[in-house]
Amino acid sequence: MNTTALRAFVGFLVAPAVPALIMYLVQLIFVRRGEAEWAAIAIGLFGYLTTVVVGIPAYFFLQRKAVTGLGVYLVLGALIGLTCYALLFIPGALLNWKANAEGAYLMLRNSAGLAVLAIVCGLIASLVFWLIAINAVRRNP
């Protein structure tokens, strides 16, 4: 395994865990340890699933196009986070819109914080991945 592939592999292992770890540490300030663990595990599992389904194919696409800019990775990470939020919440709101428009609107409004969380998690994970897999290779080819 060459250095580039090894760095990408390590990046895919580490990057999804960082937002979960940050969430765990921040939540320890506000909630009990068990609740903080639950949130971190949920974010971690969802992060690894998203990495396998979206992140790895996106990485190979960007590699094929020789795109290495931090801005591209950050924007893509934020978009992936927002897309994950949209896939989880918007279909439910649309399906319930006819039966209970106000309830569907409230669900979306009350879950807007989760959209911000998903975007921030995508940004953090993509930054960590870029630092491990892309930036290091650019500096030391």
Image: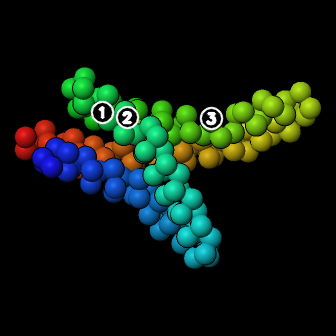
Which residue is outermost to the right? 99
Tag on residue 57? 2
Query: Upstream in the sequence, badge 3 or badge 2?
Result: 2
The three-letter amino acid code for the residue at tag 3 is Ala
42 to the left or right of 137:
right
The residue lying toward the viewer, choosing from 64 and 78, is 64
Q: Residue at position x 84%, y 29% from top? A: 97
> Could you tell me residue 133's position as x and y percent?
23, 45
Label 1 residue SS: helix
> Could you tell me residue 10's position as x and y percent?
27, 54
Label 3 sits on residue: 86
The three-letter amino acid code for the residue at tag 1 is Phe
The residue lying toward the viewer, choosing from 46 and 74, is 46
As measured in the structure, the alpha-carbon distance from the residue carrying label 1 to the one carrying label 3 is: 24 Å
As measured in the structure, the alpha-carbon distance from the residue carrying label 3 to the one carrying label 2 is: 20 Å
Q: Residue at position x 82%, y 36% from top? A: 104
Q: Is residue 48 visible?
A: yes
Mark 1 surroundings within 10 Å by alpha-carbon count, few (fewer than 14), some (14 through 19), many (20 or more): few
- Quarter the C terminus occupies: top left
Q: Residue at position x 69%, y 44% from top? A: 111
